[in-house]
């Protein structure tokens, strides 16, 4: 396979994978497809796709300024690729943003709801305007063959210089404003990154990145299309980059020194290591490589220096965008594989668009020999050496399609159960039981008898489904005996159901929250039963529902035995949960009134701490607890659960 | 009147009546622990939580309703806004879901509905409807120990200082929320250090929106300045090139003539 075909296959695979995840992203939401959390609401999609993408596209304004403002005509040959890269880069930024926004369909709100004090508002507007400028700048290239648009092209050419100046000014604004975004979080960003100079640092590094990106892109496409690398032409750009990088390093350290934060550099924290790695990649290594004339003039080293620098600046943007958070509580952020796949997929799609444009339009002075230009071309062998000379286009397209489809399928398969991921539930610690010889690994003594707080008898599961550290015990052996011994296993353990190996408690105890009919309506109404007219129970003139009905006890005087704690106020029988409340709280309310201690009748008396009502206080502590089945354990120490 | 809440952690018994009242009044749903939880009990469905802090102290956590809120400054579409009555609210019809407010908040308060396909930012609204109608928030109304009370900010500040003065051994000599990041509507007095409620250890007194003021105010100047500089450079270089070309043409003409 030709280099280009091989690369395109890889890119199509990446796009296919991303397409599958994109579906899941919009069908199931951010919780299902990212590792973002309330502690780190911004992650890779902001750091890489948006901030990295804008920075990567900085080549456009740097090169247009070089050629059209500074009149360095020798670089004219790289203007079109640079503008194209910038244009596609910004499109990729917007696409990435649509993935990251919670409500992407509202993105147009930026145009009508204004908050000019917000740096993000300014970035949004600049990106919109600059994307338009780039489109106008690049418009003449793909429409070159269309004569109907010739007058429009001529008009745009007269606007070229104002457009270039507008593009430079807009880029200055938003490249720096991406740094301004983080000015408002001085307490969140690690001190090695937070600085009032962030906008300036972002702008300088964007200029350097723009230059390095042009160099890198030239080398990569030269390799792909077997062109001669433009090393000689690019060497002065490398030299210019060197100066920009030197200014950047000086500004970065000067800023640290001025703010008195230099001591963090040697602190040994992982953030300090990250800082050194980032600075080495984005400035120190490229600076060293580009300073040596020998390296600067050699194609391989020149490309390598640019590649390292590009990676470094992107890492810088990811660091500022979320990695270099101080972090206080909550889960630590590491991107989920789906986030990485989407980011790479967007880059891959942009690259494919770039390759398409240079193959089909005059982006370069001469179009490259398309490796798949002639669809009728047959595979060829060199007659002497029997080496493979080329691949017919159709074969390439078949490969791309297959790669895309298989990658999308693999993406869906790898996603697992997005519905489960969307709930964000954490695996609950249910300790295994082994019948009567069962044991518990939670550090609770297994040989204890019931009645001692904190200890469990044999053969009992401790289930803490919602991780509140309050759970219920489950008598495994007793359930087996009650439900028919060996035959009973399948009642709860559905071995044939993926992702659902056990039934929840609710599958059997359906009446936990349900109120049920206390009486048989059909029997009461039937001539063969009580033979009652409607109005004997239902209030006349009202809808005949359970809301307008006599309490059962009006007729059934002996329904509730004297001294019972459970009352039947109306037609509906109480649910299990209500009944359980009545067992405790009925007495608590009375005692509270009698003893004038209102606090013992409050919900929080039993439901301590969190709001989840399943976490009732340890029932066994109550002096009234029967030797019954409902046992609420005192919370084990966190270290025991995890 | 500037509505405010004063929470005295020495009086709190941790009964969570405030959180229960908040869920009932704001019609929030039961929530389960999620992967993306901060670990402080707050979530998109829990706008008020009671943190079991050190030394047997319970600290009620909720939105601080800053006097000059960072989230309001950050919101690019103006969805997050500070009402004239005081509470900081999010207008969900404007929200685009960028979550910049969550990044900007120095207290880490706004929470996201990560499990929803149409997610919104949610947080305490200081029971806006109730205080607008002359009432008080559900949480302060529900507190049986009067550990958290509602009132005018100035009066509550005076009350807080009075309590500290009267009982210097019981309280640390500080009212949390009095001046950090420009002051907040929710104030705390406590016997323990409450800096765990915030992102940084040491908050300055400057409101956070001021950090972006310089950068944002220089935007028009940067735009015009850069445009003018580029235009000027273009003019100078263009002129120099043109003059050079004319000179070269003139010289070429001058050289050619003697040949003829």
Image (cartoon, grey):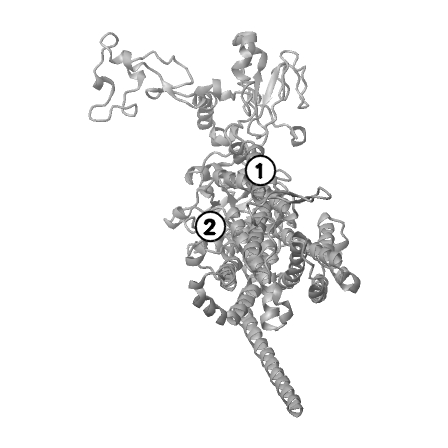
Residue B96 is marked as 2
Crowding near pointer 1: few (<14 within 10 Å), some, many (20+)?
many
Q: Position of residue B120 (x, y in %)?
A: 47, 45
Mark 1 lies on a secondary structure that is helix
- Please report, as a chain letter, where disc 1 is located: A
- Residue B252 makes an appearance in the image: yes
Q: Quadrant of the N terminus of chain A?
A: top right
In terms of depth relative to the viewer, which is nearer, A274 or A158?
A158
Q: Position of residue A67 (x, y in %)?
A: 60, 69
Q: Quadrant of the C terminus of chain A?
A: top right
B248 sits left or right of A167 in the view: right
In terms of depth relative to the viewer, which is nearer, A231 or B145?
A231
Residue B57 is marked as none
**Relative to B47, does residue A144 appear above or below in the rendering?**
below
In terms of depth relative to the viewer, which is nearer, A499 or A117?
A499
**Tags 2 and 1 touching, CB below 8 Å:** no
In terms of depth relative to the viewer, which is nearer, B247 or B145?
B247
- Residue A45 makes an appearance in the image: no
Residue A407 is marked as 1
**Relative to A634, does residue A232 appear above or below in the rendering?**
below
- Please report, as a chain letter, where disc 2 is located: B
Residue found 73% across the figure and 43% down from its top? A385
């Amino acid at each position: 396979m030709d280099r280009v075909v091989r690369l395109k296959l890889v890119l199509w695979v990446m796009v296919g994978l991303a397409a599958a995840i994109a579906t899941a992203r919009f069908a199931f939401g951010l919780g299902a497809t990212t590792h973002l959390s309330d502690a780190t609401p911004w992650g890779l999609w902001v750091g890489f796709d948006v901030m990295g993408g804008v920075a990567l596209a900085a080549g456009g304004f740097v090169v247009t300024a070089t050629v059209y403002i500074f009149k360095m005509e020798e670089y004219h040959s790289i203007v079109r690729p640079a503008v194209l890269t910038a244009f596609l880069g910004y499109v990729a930024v917007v696409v990435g943003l649509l993935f990251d926004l919670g409500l992407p369909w509202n993105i147009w709100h930026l145009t009508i709801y204004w908050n000019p004090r917000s740096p993000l508002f300014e970035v949004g507007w600049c990106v919109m305007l600059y994307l338009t400028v780039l489109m106008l700048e690049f418009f003449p290239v793909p429409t070159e063959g269309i004569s109907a648009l010739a007058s429009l092209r001529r008009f745009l050419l007269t606007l070229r210089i104002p457009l270039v100046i507008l593009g430079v000014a807009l880029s200055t604004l938003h490249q720096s404003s991406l740094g301004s975004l983080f000015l408002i979080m001085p307490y969140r960003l690690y001190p090695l990154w937070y600085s009032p100079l962030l906008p300036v640092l972002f702008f300088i590094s964007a200029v350097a990145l723009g230059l390095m990106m042009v160099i890198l892109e030239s080398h990569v496409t030269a390799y792909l299309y077997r062109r001669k690398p433009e090393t000689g032409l690019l060497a002065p750009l490398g030299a210019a980059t060197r100066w920009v990088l030197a200014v950047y390093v000086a500004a970065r350290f000067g800023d640290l020194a001025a703010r008195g934060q230099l001591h963090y550099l040697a602190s040994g924290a992982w953030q300090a290591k990250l800082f050194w790695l980032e600075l080495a990649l984005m400035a120190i290594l490229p600076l060293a490589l580009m300073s040596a004339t020998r390296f600067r003039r050699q194609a391989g080293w020149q490309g390598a220096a640019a590649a390292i620098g590009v990676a470094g600046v992107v890492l810088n943007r990811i660091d500022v965008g979320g990695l270099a958070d101080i972090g206080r509580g909550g889960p630590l952020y590491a991107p989920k594989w789906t986030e990485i796949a989407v980011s790479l997929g967007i880059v891959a799609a942009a690259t494919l668009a770039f390759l398409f444009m240079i193959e089909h339009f005059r982006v370069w002075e001469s179009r490259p020999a398309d490796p798949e230009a002639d669809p009728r071309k047959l595979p060829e062998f060199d007659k002497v050496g029997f080496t493979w000379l080329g691949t017919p286009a159709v074969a390439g397209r078949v490969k791309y399609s297959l790669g895309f489809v298989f990658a999308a399928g693999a993406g869906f398969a790898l996603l697992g159960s997005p519905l489960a991921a969307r709930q964000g539930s954490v695996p609950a610690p249910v300790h295994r039981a082994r019948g009567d010889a069962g044991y518990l690994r939670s550090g609770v003594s297994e040989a204890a008898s019931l009645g001692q707080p904190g200890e469990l008898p044999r053969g009992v599961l401790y289930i803490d489904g919602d991780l509140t550290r309050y759970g219920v015990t489950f008598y495994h052996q007793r359930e087996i005996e009650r439900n028919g011994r060996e035959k009973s296993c399948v009642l709860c353990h559905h071995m044939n159901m993926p992702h659902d190996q056990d039934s929840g408690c609710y599958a059997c105890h359906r009446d936990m929250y349900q109120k049920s009919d206390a009486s048989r309506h059909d029997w009461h109404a039937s001539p063969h039963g009580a033979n009652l007219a409607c109005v004997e129970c239902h209030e006349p003139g009202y809808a005949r529902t359970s809301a307008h009905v006599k309490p059962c006890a009006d007729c059934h005087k002996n329904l509730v035995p004297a001294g019972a704690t459970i009352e039947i106020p109306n037609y509906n029988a109480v649910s299990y949960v209500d009944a359980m409340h009545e067992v405790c709280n009925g007495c608590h309310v009375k005692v509270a009134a009698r003893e004038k201690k209102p606090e013992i009748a409050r919900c929080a008396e039993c439901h301590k701490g969190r709001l989840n009502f399943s976490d009732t206080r340890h029932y066994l502590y109550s002096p009234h607890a029967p030797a019954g089945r409902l046992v609420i354990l005192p919370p084990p120490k966190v270290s025991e659960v995890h | 009147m500037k509505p405010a809440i004063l929470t005295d952690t020495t009086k709190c018994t941790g009964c969570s009546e405030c959180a229960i009242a908040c869920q009932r009044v704001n019609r929030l749903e039961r929530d389960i622990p999620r992967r993306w939880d901060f670990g402080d009990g707050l979530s998109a469905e829990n706008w008020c939580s009671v943190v079991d802090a050190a030394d047997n102290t319970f600290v009620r956590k909720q939105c601080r309703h800053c006097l000059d809120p960072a989230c309001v400054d950050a919101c690019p579409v103006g969805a997050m806004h500070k009402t004239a009555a005081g509470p900081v609210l999010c207008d969900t019809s404007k929200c685009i879901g960028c979550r910049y407010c969550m990044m900007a908040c120095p207290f880490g308060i706004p929470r996201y509905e990560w499990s929803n396909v149409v997610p919104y930012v949610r947080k305490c609204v200081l029971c806006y409807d109730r205080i607008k109608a002359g009432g008080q928030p559900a949480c302060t109304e529900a507190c049986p120990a009067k550990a958290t009370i509602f009132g005018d900010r100035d009066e509550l500040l005076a009350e807080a200082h009075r309590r500290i003065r009267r009982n210097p051994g019981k309280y640390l000599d500080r009212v949390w929320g009095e001046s950090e990041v420009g002051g907040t509507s929710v104030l705390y007095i406590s016997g323990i250090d409450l800096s765990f409620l915030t992102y940084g250890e040491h908050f300055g007194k400057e409101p956070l929106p001021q950090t972006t003021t310089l950068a944002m105010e220089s935007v028009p100047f940067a735009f015009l300045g850069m445009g003018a500089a580029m235009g000027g450079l273009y003019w100078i270089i263009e002129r120099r090139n043109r003059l050079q070309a004319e000179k070269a043409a003139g010289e070429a003409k001058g050289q050619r003539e003697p040949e003829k």
